[in-house]
Amino acid sequence: MARIILITGGCRSGKSRFALEKANSVGNTKFFLATCPRIDSEMDERIQRHQQERIGWNTIEEELELSPVFDSIPSESVVLVDCLSLWINNLMFEANKKSLNLTQDQIKDVCLNLGKHILDSKMENVFLVTNEVGMGLVPENKEGRLYRDLLGICNQIFASIANEVYFLVSGIPIRIKSSPKINL
């Protein structure tokens, strides 16, 4: 059963760097599961810069279907998913392209399914990076509020099953949970 470490915080708080450092300190074979879509040249440059920081990592780019990726990764590997925030964004974007709206119940089901898939996997450690978006102002538009709500649900689910949860502020990690995980 995988050990799950959730790392959260605001944008540019140092979450990814911290997750990479923690993941580099454990295990052998490492897989980086990137959820960021390639949308423009600036994003391509960011992706390339981040890839250069991950020497020795196997990178898998998947924007939507995260559960099947865990089936293709060798057991006892270390996996870093960066990030759940973009994953939720991507799911909303795909639904909008089909003129659909994701509901809180649908996101809950998708997150619970991924969480169960991770827990049932033979991974050694799974690091999950996500943004904390619930500490700011209420978004001015409906879609922004929906995103905040859906990501909040996602974050709560993964925090509940994680062995450890870290919150980063200005590059400083604060451990906010260290306990056995809850099985789904």
Image (cartoon, rainbow, N blue to C red):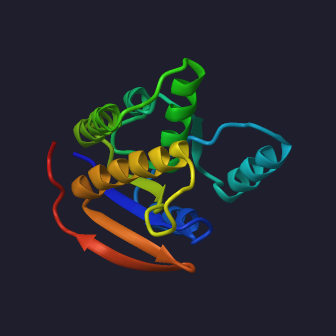
| Residue plotted at (36% across, 47% down) | 154
User: Which quadrant would the N terminus be assigned to in this image?
Assistant: top left
| Residue at 40% from the left image edge and 26% from the top image edge | 68
> As rendered, which of 114 and 148 lies closer to the eye?
148
**What is the x, y in percent for residue 152?**
38, 53
Against 103, is 41 above or below?
Answer: below
Measured along the vertical axis of the image, is residue 16 above or below residue 33?
A: below
23 left or right of 111 in image: right
Asked if residue 28 shows in the view, the reply is yes
**Looking at the picture, how far across and down is residue 19, in whole percent?**
49, 63
Q: Quadrant of the C terminus?
A: top left
Residue 76 left/right relative to 38: left
What residue is drawn where x is 62% and y is 42%? 36
- The number of numbered badges drawn on the structure is 0
Q: Is 17 placed above or below 36 here?
A: below
Q: Residue 56 at x, y = what percent?
A: 61, 51
* Residue 83 visible in the current orientation: no
In the displayed image of the protein, which residue is found farthest to the right?
41
User: Quadrant of residue 93 in the image?
Assistant: top right
Left or right position of 64 against 176: right
Query: Picture coordinates of residue 31 (x, y %)?
Result: 51, 44
Please identify the quarter of the rendering in which residue 11 is found.
bottom right
**Which quarter of the figure has residue 72?**
top left
